[in-house]
Amino acid sequence: EAGVAQSPRYKIIEKRQSVAFWCNPISGHATLYWYQQILGQGPKLLIQFQNNGVVDDSQLPKDRFSAERLKGVDSTLKIQPAKLEDSAVYLCASSLSPGGYGYTFGSGTRLTVV
Amino acid sequence: GQQLNQSPQSMFIQEGEDVSMNCTSSSIFNTWLWYKQEPGEGPVLLIALYKAGELTSNGRLTAQFGITRKDSFLNISASIPSDVGIYFCAGPYNNNDMRFGAGTRLTVKP
């Protein structure tokens, strides 16, 4: 089966600019996650969707981060405006159901904010 | 929040050696997961543990769910160069939020 697709692979922006990342999960996976992985750390959950509804966004910095999954399939994560500390790899993952631990991660988008 | 502490932070070993790493938490987890991440890729699930005391193998990898439910161990036997990567332990917090440790970076010298 095709994996989780993410784009772009790399992005370099200046602070205060905006950026958007795209994720297409595995077909049929109802649950979609966005994780932030800062260099030298493990991934940290930003937001979880079940179909097109938000299940958990408690760790999403909502003053600058937003995410949507309008049709319950692909998803977009946006940062506006970006700060230097947002430099990280943004990983998208999907699973058949919440609590299903067979997460499949995408390859991520590496964001550098200068 | 729940903290997962992994040790060691990094390991440099010779090909053919065995490797042991562990993960501890101040709180109980009902599931322990071990992932491997290679450069430029997302983490890939290696082993999932669902019961205290459980010992599960996946090829040369063996993981154990600690009896106290506050720790887990991963062993790799007869390491090979392709074992290089970062190994993360993870566990679900509140069923939704998968918490990850900071990882153990493994380097294997041929």
Image (spheres, coloured by chain):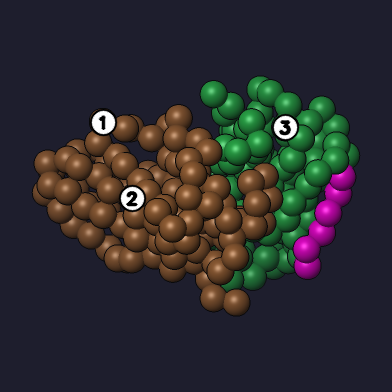
Chain colours: A brown, B green
Is residue B56 part of the magenta span, yes or no? yes
Say which residue label 1 marks.
A63
Where residue B101 sits: x, y (%)?
56, 39
Q: Which residues are magenta?
A: B54-59
Residue B8 image-quadrant placement:
top right
**Residue occupying the point 64% across, 57% down:** A96
Q: Residues within 10 Å of mark 2 (few under 14, many from 20)?
A: some
Q: Are marks 1 and 3 in contact (CB under 8 Å)?
A: no
**Does residue A23 appear in the picture of this structure?**
yes
Callout 3: chain? B
Please identify the quarter of the rendering in which residue A65 is found: top left
Number of numbered discs visible in the structure rendering: 3
Going by the image, does A58 lie left or right of B3? left
Q: Which residue is mark 3?
A: B29
Dot label at residue A77: 2
Q: Chain of mark 1?
A: A
Above or below, B63 against A82 in this view is: below
> Residue type at mark 3?
Phe
Q: Is A57 part of what is drawn in magenta?
A: no
Residue shown at the point (50%, 36%) measured from the top left: A56
Please tell me whether mark 3 or mark 2 is closer to you in this view: 2
Question: For the residue marked with disc 1, what is the amino acid?
Answer: Asp
Q: Residue at x 26, y 31 (%)?
A: A63
The residues bearing labels 1 and 3 have C-alpha atoms spaced at a distance of: 32 Å
Quarter of the image for residue B95 reads top right
Mark 3 in CB contact with mark 2 (< 8 angstroms):
no
For the residue pair A1 and A31, the one nearer the viewer reads as A31
Would you say the magenta stretch is mainly helix, strand or loop?
strand
Instruction: Mark 1 or mark 2: name the one nearer the start of the chain.
Output: 1
Query: In this view of the protein, can residue B106 be seen by the observer?
Result: no
Assign a secondary structure to mark 1.
loop
